[in-house]
């Protein structure tokens, strides 16, 4: 437990210090969402209607930004070698890293989403729904990204490949995240149905992600 | 305690690095792995640490903890120093002490042992190559593990650093530890056995 807590604390510390990139995702999210009204024009009704989709897309893209640091940094400086000789299962070690990553890059997106909802003329109910679905859905994005990060770990500058690998896998999360947000406002399905599936997707990725990532890292041992 | 390797084979990148390699190292003994560049010294150490898959042969640690792999009972000191630039010297070492299972109490004595106790609060980015090496060596002191796998341990260390490392290695051997070191020159250990790779090619 000490080892896992140390990993979690170190990764969070690294993320918030100089060059850590914890805020980059939030800034990117802010910029993407701010650009949307410029592109779509000042049609407030349209913005309110597609606002949840814009927020979800922005969060999805922003969560990709820092993924290539998740494991590659530890691979480059040899830390991954030492983590492999630690007496903790690799599955739990990568899970701890992913949790730290979500706390520093995913959670801030959830926190700023309501503020950005104001920019898109979202009504409070829709804003709340988006924030809640992001809270439930962004861990899935991180843990799916964890698999991609482990697969591309040996490639220098594998960031773009990582995005191409991970984005298709996040489609279900996006669909049910946006569906649940819309259902809360316009219906006709009750909010609980797509939200339940979203939570199921997250729980599934929480289980599958660490095992798949650990398997990919072990297979790539060289 | 005795580390026994028999008929080891290693394939990396589709190329056979070595095969049929066998040796035994007992408690208090050091084994120097020598040979020309590219002959597989680093590969052998990474293989012992469990960082490269075993292609053939067997590896066992008699008298060790049977629940743990050899790698989990070993320190691996490779070419990369596994330090984070934005963390302080102390934070770097305390992190590895926690992860590798040492505990926080030995962090400061370990820093003192490698001569870095005055720099504990300095971010690691300001360390020189030799100081980074010393900090990596401090890991071996902060966490007790019976096997030390050292890959060119003296690289970028100055004369006093090499003498310090030799003292630490002698103390480790005297305490019943094992050392397997890949090296080109002398690392200041008398009476160490030598395993020369690539001689039969």
Image: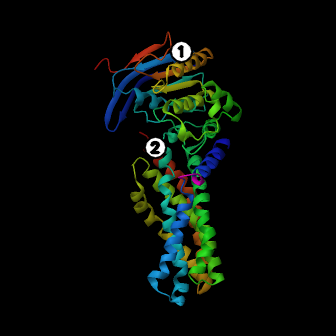
Q: Which labelled disc corresponds to residue B29? A: 1
Residue found at x 62% / y 81%: A126
Between circles 2 and 1, the one closer to the viewer is 2
Above or below residue B161? Residue A121 is below
**Callouts 2 and 1 close, C-beta under 8 Å:** no
Q: Chain of mark 2?
A: A
Q: Residue furthest right?
A: B105
- The foreground one among A26 and A185 is A26
How far apart, in angstroms, are the residues tagged by discs 2 and 1? 32 Å
Query: Which residue is labeled 2 in the image?
Result: A76
Above or below residue A81? Residue A163 is below
For mark 2, does the 10 Å Cα neighbourhood hold few (<14), some (14 to 19), or many (20 or more) residues?
A: some
> Looking at the picture, how far across and down is residue A24, in whole percent?
53, 61
**SS at badge 2:** helix
In the image, the segment drawn in magenta is A15-19
Q: In the figure, is residue B195 to the left or right of B126? A: left
Indicate whether residue A9 is drawn in magenta. Answer: no
> Looking at the picture, how far across and down is residue A74, in whole percent?
50, 45
């Amino acid at each position: 437990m000490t080892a896992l807590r140390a990993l979690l604390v170190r990764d969070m510390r690294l993320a918030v210090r100089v060059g850590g990139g914890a805020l980059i995702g939030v800034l990117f999210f802010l910029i993407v969402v701010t650009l949307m009204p410029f592109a779509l024009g000042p049609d407030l009704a349209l913005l309110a209607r597609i606002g949840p989709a814009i927020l979800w897309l922005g969060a999805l893209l922003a969560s990709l930004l820092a993924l290539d640091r998740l494991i590659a940094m530890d691979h480059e400086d040899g830390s991954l070698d030492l983590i492999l000789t630690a007496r903790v299962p690799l599955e739990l070690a990568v899970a701890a890293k992913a949790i730290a990553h979500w706390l520093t890059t995913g959670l801030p997106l959830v926190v700023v989403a309501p503020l950005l909802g104001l920019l898109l003329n979202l009504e409070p109910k829709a804003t709340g729904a988006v924030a809640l679905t992001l809270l439930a859905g962004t861990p899935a994005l991180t843990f799916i990204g964890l698999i991609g990060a482990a697969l591309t770990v040996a490639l220098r500058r594998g960031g773009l490949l990582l995005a191409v690998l991970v984005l298709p896998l996040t489609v279900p999360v996006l669909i049910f995240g946006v569906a649940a947000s819309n259902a809360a406002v316009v219906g006709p399905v009750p909010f609980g149905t797509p939200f339940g599936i979203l939570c199921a997707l997250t729980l599934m990725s929480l289980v599958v992600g660490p095992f798949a990532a650990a398997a990919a890292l072990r297979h790539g041992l060289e | 305690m005795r580390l026994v390797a028999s008929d080891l084979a290693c394939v990396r990148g589709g190329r056979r690095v070595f095969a049929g390699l066998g040796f035994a190292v007992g408690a208090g003994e050091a084994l120097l792995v020598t040979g020309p560049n590219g002959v597989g010294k680093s590969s052998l150490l990474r293989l012992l640490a469990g960082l490269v898959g075993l292609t053939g042969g067997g590896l066992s640690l008699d008298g060790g903890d049977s629940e743990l792999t050899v790698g989990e009972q070993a320190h691996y000191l490779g070419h990369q120093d596994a330090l984070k630039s934005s963390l302080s010297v102390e934070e770097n070492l305390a992190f590895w002490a926690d992860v590798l299972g040492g505990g926080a109490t030995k962090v400061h004595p370990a820093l003192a042992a490698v001569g870095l106790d005055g720099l504990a609060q300095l971010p690691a980015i300001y360390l020189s190559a030799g100081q980074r090496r010393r900090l990596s060596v401090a890991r071996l002191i902060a966490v007790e593990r019976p096997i030390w796998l050292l890959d060119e341990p003296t690289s970028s260390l100055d004369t006093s650093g090499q003498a310090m490392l030799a003292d630490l290695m002698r103390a480790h051997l005297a305490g019943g530890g094992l050392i397997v070191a890949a090296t080109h020159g002398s690392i200041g250990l008398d009476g160490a056995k030598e395993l020369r790779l690539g001689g039969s090619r």
